[in-house]
Image (cartoon, rainbow, N blue to C red):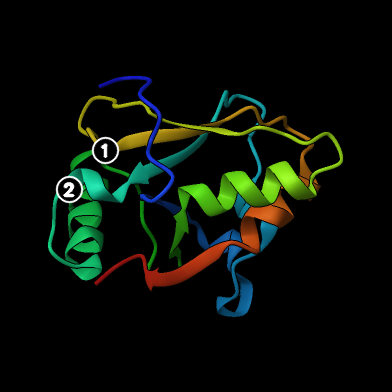
Amino acid sequence: MKDNKIPNQNHVARYCSPMHVPDGEIQATAFMLRPVDTSLSVNWLEYFKCSSREGEIDELRKTYAAKNLIVKASGRIAVLNVGEVRNKVLIESPDSRNLEILHDPIENDPSHSGIFNLRNDDELIAELILETILETYPACN
C-alpha cells in the first residue's frame, strides 16, 4: 500500500550505477538525491515474499528489466536494513534527521519505495547510509 512505512526489521535495496562504483566499491554518492528527486529510490525486498535473499535479488533484477531500467554489469545492488539506516542517521546526523522509508509503488515496479527527508546536499547523510550496507550483489546475473 502506498506510503506505508516499511518495518524496521525489513530490507531495501538500491541499484548503484557504475559511476558510483569505481573499482567495485560503492561510494556515498550512490545515496544522494538528484535535483529532480523527492526521495531516494529503493526497492522493498520482503515485498517479493521469497524464501531467500538470492530469490529477492533475482526478483529485483526482473523488476529492473520490466521497467526498462538500464542496468550495467559493473553496477551493484546494495542491501540495507531499514531500522539500521533510520537509527544510524537519527543518532549520528547533526540535526538528528528522522528518515522515513516508505512503500511507494510505481508502474511496473510494485516493490518501489523511497527514503524520504533527504536534501540534495546531504553528503554526511549519504556517508551514514553507505556505512549501513549489509551486503552487495552484482546488478546483473
Q: Are marks 2 and 1 in contact (CB under 8 Å)?
A: yes
Q: Nearer the viewer, residue 107 or 10?
A: 10
Question: Do we see residue 74 in this rendering?
Answer: no
Identify the residue at the far bottom of this view: 23
Q: Position of residue 79 (x, y in %)?
A: 43, 60
Q: Answer left or right for 32 relative to 62.
A: right
Identify the residue at the far top of this view: 2
Q: Position of residue 38 (x, y in %)?
A: 57, 23
From this view, report whether residue 135 is shown above or below residue 10: below
Q: Amino acid at mark 2?
A: Phe
Q: Residues within 10 Å of mark 1 (few under 14, many from 20)?
A: many
The residue indicated by pointer 1 is: 111
Which quarter of the figure is the N terminus placed in? Answer: top left
| Residue positioned 46% across, 33% down in the render | 114
From this view, report whether residue 15 is shown above or below residue 122: below
Label 2, label 1: how far apart the Cα atoms are = 7 Å
Q: Which mark is residue 31?
A: none
Q: Amino acid at mark 1?
A: Ser
| Residue positioned 24% across, 38% down in the render | 67
The residue indicated by pointer 2 is: 48
